[in-house]
Structures are given as C-alpha cells and as structure tokens.
Amino acid sequence: MKNNIISAIRLTLVCLVFFCGIYTLAVYGISKLAPESMSFAKTKAGYYENVGQSFTNDKYFYSRPSAVAYNAAGSGGSNKGPSNPNYLAEVQARIDSFLVHNPGVQKEDIPSDLVTASGSGLDPNISVQGAKVQVKRIASIRNMNESTIHQLIEQQTEKPLLGLFGTEKINVLKLNLALDILN
C-alpha cells in the first residue's frame, strides 16, 4: 500500500509540472507563432478586425447579419430552426431590405451569408459572391469604376488555408477600410 501511495504522489507531481508548466508554455509558444488572423487583432484605426461589425451606410460593403447585434460579450446564434416562422420572417425582411438598397439584384442572386446570421453572430467575413453582389451600389454611390472595386475585392480575398481548408472569404472591415483609402 505504501508503494501505491508513493507512486501516486510521484505521478501527481510529474503531472503538475508537465501540465502546469511545460504544456502551458508549449501552447503559449505555439499561439505566438500563429498567424495574426487567429487572434483579435486591432487595425490601425482601432477596430477589431476579427469581430463582425455593422455597416449600414450604402457606401460600404454590408456585413453578415448578427443575431447578437455584434456584441462580442453575448456571442451566439438565434437558435431558431430553418422552419421557424419568426426566423423566416427575419430572413425575408433582410432580403427585402437588401433588394431596396441594391436595385437590379435579383432575390436568387443574394448569397445566403448576407441574409443569415452566423453561429456566433460575430463573423467578420462575407463570401466573395457576397461582396461582388454589392459592387453596383457602391460604385454608383462613390462614383467609382466597377472594375476598380472588383480589383479591390480580388486583393482583399483570403484564400483557403493551404488551398484546401475552408472557402474564399473577405474580411468586411479590411475591405471597407481599403475602399475608404481608394475613395
């Protein structure tokens, strides 16, 4: 019995040193090597680029809707299913609003990420299609050439990790800041 207690104490001490010291330092070191996009990086303008933000002015690209009003303290989705009448009414209202602000766009051309909230309610990215469908509106309001805005979208597009994991996406804040620099 004495041998079992001594072995248990040794194992406890080894685990404490490993998990409280070595493992913690290893994870911390790896996190410092991670790309900046993996953390809450602040832009020079003082905005957090990894938290979705509301852009309602027609001269900017719209963000993905948020179920939590872009409040990072209350991250979460609406938890309403796709057959919930309240949810369907909310999505329809977003579609109607988008069509009012983007004349000439057909309902079937609106990507789902522009009318449905993400699981966290804080997604800072939209799809490339979500950006391209807004080009006419922005070009018209800013008196810019559409091809210039398309080039900006291409420059701001983030490719999938290693070309395999994920989809192409665009950080709306970065895109809108770059748009302000152009015009």
Image (cartoon, grey):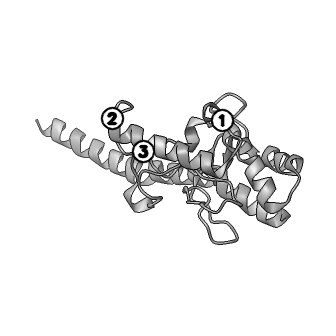
**Residue 13 placement (x, y as % from top left):** 30, 49
Judge left or right: residue 6 versus residue 53. left
Marks counted in the figure total 3
- The residue depicted at 40 percent of the width and 37 percent of the height is 88
Circle 2 is placed at which residue position?
Answer: 84
| Badge number at residue 106 | 1
Of circles 1 and 3, the one toward us is 1
Q: Earlier in the sequence, mark 3 or mark 2?
A: 2
| Badge number at residue 90 | 3
Judge left or right: residue 181 versus residue 171. right
Element at label 3: helix
Residue 80 visible in the snapshot: no
Residue 168 visible in the snapshot: yes
Give me the C-alpha separation between circle 1 and circle 2.
24 Å
Of circles 1 and 2, the one toward us is 1
Give me the C-alpha separation between circle 3 and circle 2.
10 Å
Element at label 1: loop
Relative depth, front residue between 183 and 91? 91
| Badge number at residue 68 | none
Image height check: is 22 above or below 183? Answer: above
Relative depth, front residue between 55 and 50? 55
- The residue depicted at 33 percent of the width and 36 percent of the height is 85
Give me the C-alpha separation between circle 1 and circle 3.
18 Å
Relative depth, front residue between 14 and 63? 63
Within-10-Å neighbours for mark 2: few <14, some 14–19, many 20+: few
- The residue depicted at 10 percent of the width and 35 percent of the height is 1
**Residue 91 placement (x, y as % from top left):** 46, 41
Judge left or right: residue 54 versus residue 18. right
The amino acid at mark 2 is Asn
Classify residue 7 by image quadrant.
top left
